[in-house]
Image: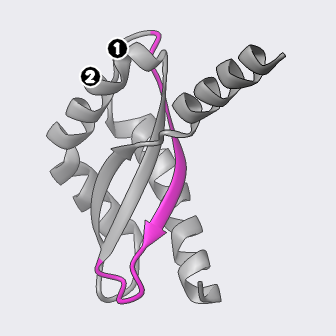
Amino acid sequence: MSHRILQINGLIREHLGNIFLREVSFKVGTLVTITKVDTSADLRHSRILVSVFPETESVYALKTLEHEKGAIQKALHRKLHMKPLPVISFHCDPTGENADIIEKLLIELR
C-alpha cells in the first residue's frame, strides 16, 4: 500500500471520528469506534470498519450509520480537499468475534 493511501486512510479516520462525535447520535451506552479505513487505489471508495460495544447493538449501529450516510458523506467531503472524493461504506469489524472464537478454541485445547 502506498504512503499516500495510508495518509488518506488516517485523514478519513480522523475526520470521521470527529463527525461521529458531533453529528451522529447513537443510543446511550452504545460505543462505535472506527477500527480501520481501507481506501481503494483509485481513491473512489473507502471501506470503513467499525467496532460496536456492546456487540448486540451492531445491527442497530450499522443501520444508524447507513441512515445517516448522506450527511456523514457530505460532512466528510467538506473536510477533505482532494479529488476524487471517496464514497464511504460501513462494515462491522469481525476482529472481536474472531478473537472470541480463537479464545474458546484455546480453552478447549487446554
Residue occupying image coordinates x 48% and y 57%: 15
* Contact between labelled residues 1 and 2, with CB atoms less than 8 Å apart: yes
Query: Residue visible at 54% across and 55% down?
Result: 36
Spatial separation of the CA atoms under disc 2 and disc 1:
9 Å
Residue at x-position 35% and y-position 46%: 91
15 lies left or right of 10: left
Q: Quadrant of residue 84?
A: bottom left
Residue 28 coordinates in the image, percent (x, y): 41, 10
Instruction: Compare residues 34 and 76 and report the one nearer the observer.
Output: 34
Among the 4 quarters of the image, the one containing residue 73: bottom left
Residue tagged 1: 27
**What amino acid is labelled 1 in the image?**
Lys
Would you name the residue on which mark 2 appears?
60
| Foreground: disc 2 or disc 1 | 2
Q: Amino acid at mark 2?
A: Tyr
In the visual, does 66 lie left or right of 38?
left
Q: Which residues are magenta?
A: 29-44
Q: Residue at x 15, y 38 (%)?
A: 67
**Which numbered disc, 2 or 1, marks the residue that appears first in the sequence?**
1
